[in-house]
Amino acid sequence: MCKEMFIYQIYILLGIILTLVLHPFVLKILIKLKARQTLRKEGPAEHKFKEGTPTMGGLSILIPIIILTLAFSKFSIESIAIILTVIGFMMIGFIDDLLIVIKGKNDGIRPKVKLALQILVSILFAVYLIYSGHETVTNIPFTNMSVNLGLFYIPFIVFVMVAETNAVNLTDGLDGLASGTMAIAIIPFIIMLYFLNSGDGFTDASIIMGSVCIGSCLGFLWFNSHPASVFMGDTGSLPLGGIISILAIVSNNELWLIFAGFVFLIEALSVTIQVLYYKKTKKRIFLMSPLHHHFEKLGWKETKVTARFYLIGIIASLITVIGSILI
């Protein structure tokens, strides 16, 4: 166990180092492309100074993940499958960000088209999992029970992946928020996969990818912490949601995303509740959604909101570890 945990720490460290090394080169390319942040008009006034900050910096996170996962997995068919899935989400985000840059306004891929593409990538991954003999079961949190979903497995996986990618995307609204909470939320799934000890290629590749992702997110924080010198954009947030989904799916612990990814959940729910309530009453429950903007409107500093969301993420991850491993 000690040897394996040491190796995982090496993966994390390499993720940090490679992200720090590659980012300056990625940033030069983004500046040449004039990939600058375009803020939505209804966004907080306090964020106006962020207009023009380089975006699409998620490439600095994803490139190390792709390279190191494939290299340490020795280009196994399973590692190629999960990386192609991550690249699929990354390309959706990249095209969305690129269209916004080209148009000069916050208007990327049409929502329905974006959703359809996310569903397509998710279906392809789910079908390949079944083809590879992956169990169509999901474990019930805080119990030793599991449910075989049978024919409902593919729609279930699609829902999990699409919901999680969009939830992470919505969380990416404050400096360092998405990258920091992602690094925290992935830890329980690395532990789950370790104790799963299935020995199959999907488990091994997922542990490597998750460990490197933690490091890459931490490395990106060097540039993305307040005041951020670069934003990850959808290029980063969508594939990060895909990565944590894959870790949960491979370990058959999809429902634990509710707890480990609690920050992402409440961010997504705040938007859903706000939209539905406003359509019905023309009134708002939150001062602004997603939820992090609500607290900003209450007068909290951006750094205070981020730090407290980190704390919530840590508590949620600890609950997940205790509930999934010790119970």
Image: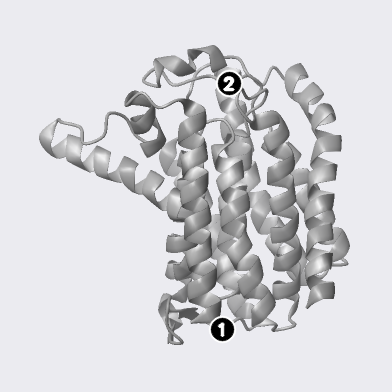
Q: Name the residue beneath numbered marker 1.
A: 135
Q: Is residue 175 above or below residue 2?
A: above
Q: Nearer the viewer, residue 166 or 304?
A: 304
Q: Name the residue beneath numbered marker 2.
A: 37
Q: Residues within 10 Å of mark 2 (few under 14, many from 20)?
A: many
Picture residue at 58% right of the left edge, 50% below the top: 182
Question: In the image, which disc is placed on residue 194?
Answer: none
Q: Residues within 10 Å of mark 1 (few under 14, many from 20)?
A: some
Picture residue at 53% right of the left edge, 12% below the top: 49
Q: Amino acid at mark 2?
A: Gln
Screen quadrant of the N terminus: bottom right
Picture residue at 82% right of the left edge, 66% below the top: 6
What kind of element bears circle 1?
loop
Q: Position of residue 287 (x, y in %)?
A: 27, 29
Which one is earlier in the sequence, the residue at label 1 or at label 2? 2
The answer to whether 306 appears left or right of 21 in the picture is: left
Q: Amino acid at mark 1?
A: Glu
Q: Nearer the viewer, residue 154 or 227?
A: 227
